[in-house]
Amino acid sequence: MAGAAAHQGSPVALTLEEVRQYGIDSFDDPDYLSLYGLRPADWYALGVRLLGRTAVECTRDVLADRIGRDIARITASLPTGMPITAIDPFAGSCNTLYWILRHVPASQGVAFEFDPQVFKLISRNIAHLDRSIVLKQGDFLATPASHDLPPGHALVIFVAPPWGTALDESEGLDLSRTEPPITQTIEQVSRRYAGRKILFATQVYEKVESRSLAKLEGTLEWCQLAVYNFNASGRNHGILLGTKGWTPC
């Protein structure tokens, strides 16, 4: 990402030209980074802005939409009318959470962002959206008590921590080496919300290191893996859906 690279670690937001050039350079598509149901030119005109890091790490519309639909398909097995709180502990752009809220009825959204620069920018971005998201600054895993669920709410957790060095093109994504490890996130959330019906939606890569996948699946009561065919072979993302406290019908 040539233009964005100059802004990494800087509070300067990307220009529209840089966003479109990233799509061209990386995926041969100037509109690759569509967010919130809008092409780059449209969300930029609305006032949405991204830092380089967020642009590289965020989940674009075509993937976030599909993740939201698959989460909605599973949460449809919950008792009729049960309210749902969807939490993204690693907010970034909040685009996946946005699509979860679009597809899951009776849901409310809460996101956490540790980086103060990202927090400030995304706070302004989500104010333009047609879904309400409560964005909190801080580390959700360090202070999970910062959000107490209302009685009777089920919980959807979108688990997508930074991959860092966890992705190796030959070995695949090692789920135990993300930052923080995905199993740590699931264990902490499960303890904090023991007795709740929880759906974990973990973003994965087309190839996943088998031992780390088996370990993660072993922590869940029910799970289902799906890989989406949106990119070239070998560069696709997917989702591992898994539950605690209930089993979908």
Image (spheres, rainbow, N blue to C red):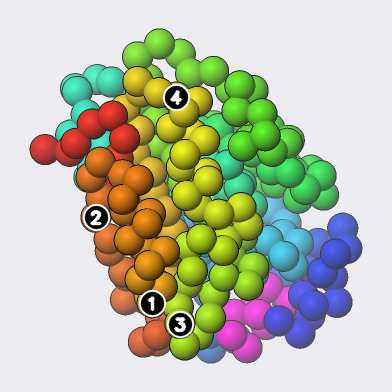
Q: Can residue 156 be seen from the camera position used here? A: yes
Residues at marks 3 and 1, CA–CA distance in whole angstroms: 7 Å
Residues at marks 2 and 4, CA–CA distance in whole angstroms: 22 Å
Which of disc 1 and disc 4 is earlier in sequence?
4
Which of disc 3 and disc 4 is earlier in sequence?
3
Amino acid type of the residue that numbered disc 4 sits on in the rendered structure:
Tyr
In which quadrant will I find the C terminus? top left
Q: Are marks 3 and 1 in contact (CB under 8 Å)?
A: yes
x then y, percent, for residue 165:
63, 72
Amino acid type of the residue that numbered disc 3 sits on in the rendered structure:
Glu
Q: Which residue is mark 3?
A: 171
Does residue 215 appear left or right of residue 247 in this picture?
right
In which quadrant will I find the N terminus? bottom right
Q: 10 Å neighbourhood of mark 1: few (<14), some, or many (≥20)?
A: many
Residues at marks 4 and 1, CA–CA distance in whole angstroms: 31 Å
Q: Residue at x 64, y 68 (%)?
A: 164
Q: Which residue is mark 4?
A: 193
Q: Which residue is mark 2?
A: 224
Which of disc 4 and disc 2 is earlier in sequence?
4
Task: Tell me if residue 164 is in the magenta stretch.
Answer: no
Amino acid type of the residue that numbered disc 2 sits on in the rendered structure:
Gln
Q: Which residue is mark 1?
A: 207
Q: Can residue 29 be seen from the camera position used here? A: no
Count of all numbered marks drawn on residues in the image = 4
Does residue 6 appear left or right of residue 73 in this picture?
right
Which of disc 1 and disc 3 is earlier in sequence?
3
Decide: is 108 above or below 175: above
Q: Nearer the viewer, residue 135 or 88?
A: 88
